[in-house]
Amino acid sequence: MHAKVIRYFVEVVRAGSIRKAAEQLHVVPTAVNRQILNLEEELGAPLFERIHNTLKLTPVGEIVLAHARGTLHEFDLVRQRIEAVRGLRQGEVTLATTAGLADSFLPAVVQRFREAHPGIQLKLLGLPIAAVLRSVSEGDADLALAYDVPGTAGFRTLFASEWPIGAVVPPGHPLTAHATTVLAECVGYPLILPAPSLSIRPILDAAFGLSGVSASPVVETTSTALMRRLVRQGGGITLLNRLDVDEDRQEGSLVFVPLRDAALRAQTLTLETRASQPPSPAAELFANHLVACLDELLAS
């Protein structure tokens, strides 16, 4: 019964102003403002501080926001479960992940899922690692998929897997003469390294330091797609985990040579959801599909 006022309130928080929220909701600003004023009157307290044409949540507003997000999510779960009971293959899933996974591993996963479940809408959010879990905790995403996420209360791990790091080189490169290699052998070639902001870079830096190897990259980038393309073009070699280059590896356009340095640990990939409530039927279906695809790759 309060669906409209809740949606209007949450959209005002997201947009930061009544005017912008009205544009997103396709209504006039006065309609949004009236709903907010009615809610404030009903609660007997202001929800926003209006400072220099900007809206800032009051402590009461923060409490209402948490309730509103939970209510909207619960209503979506009820709707999807009703659809499931009625046999409708419909629903919506939002996955928060990093740009690297969105560029490499996920396109094939999404395509296979869409072929099997055309009625389910997928939304993929490519976010910085710090924002991936936050999007799930705030209700903007159902699932989070990322490397080396910190242990955080309020989350449940649905799946975890280890992905070793190796040298990524073009076919016929000298490093492909052996089944494995070491960091000391890699620095003899132009290095294209992940930027410090990516989760793999601290692992590499620590391993270089412990191995006593000095690395001077010719290129640093946040884009794993760009790293792979530069390697294919002969611009150097890069260091990534096997999942990052699996499609190129299967196509034969790149070769993954595992690193055997004892100081180098694998990356941990985890699929997370909120611990407080089970995922929706559609989200659970996609999570199971995602895990099955990862299991296939681990076995290959």
Image (cartoon, rainbow, N blue to C red):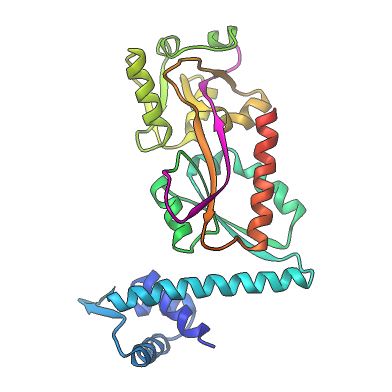
- Quarter containing the C terminus: top right
Q: In the rendered image of this protein, does residue 30 appear above or below residue 194?
A: below
- Quarter containing the N terminus: bottom right
User: Which residues are drawn in magenta?
Assistant: 150-172
Residue at (63% x, 25% y) in the render: 249
Horizontal and vertical percent position of residue 221: 40, 33
Horizontal and vertical percent position of residue 22: 42, 80
Q: Residue furthest right?
A: 87
| Magenta-span inclusion, residue 171 | yes
Residue at (66% x, 53% y) in the render: 286
Q: Can residue 149 be seen in this snapshot?
A: yes
Magenta span: predominant SS is: strand
| Magenta-span inclusion, residue 226 | no
Horizontal and vertical percent position of residue 270: 53, 42
In this view, the residue in front, 244 or 46, is: 46
Horizontal and vertical percent position of residue 96: 51, 52
Q: In the rendered image of this protein, does residue 168 appear above or below residue 102?
A: above
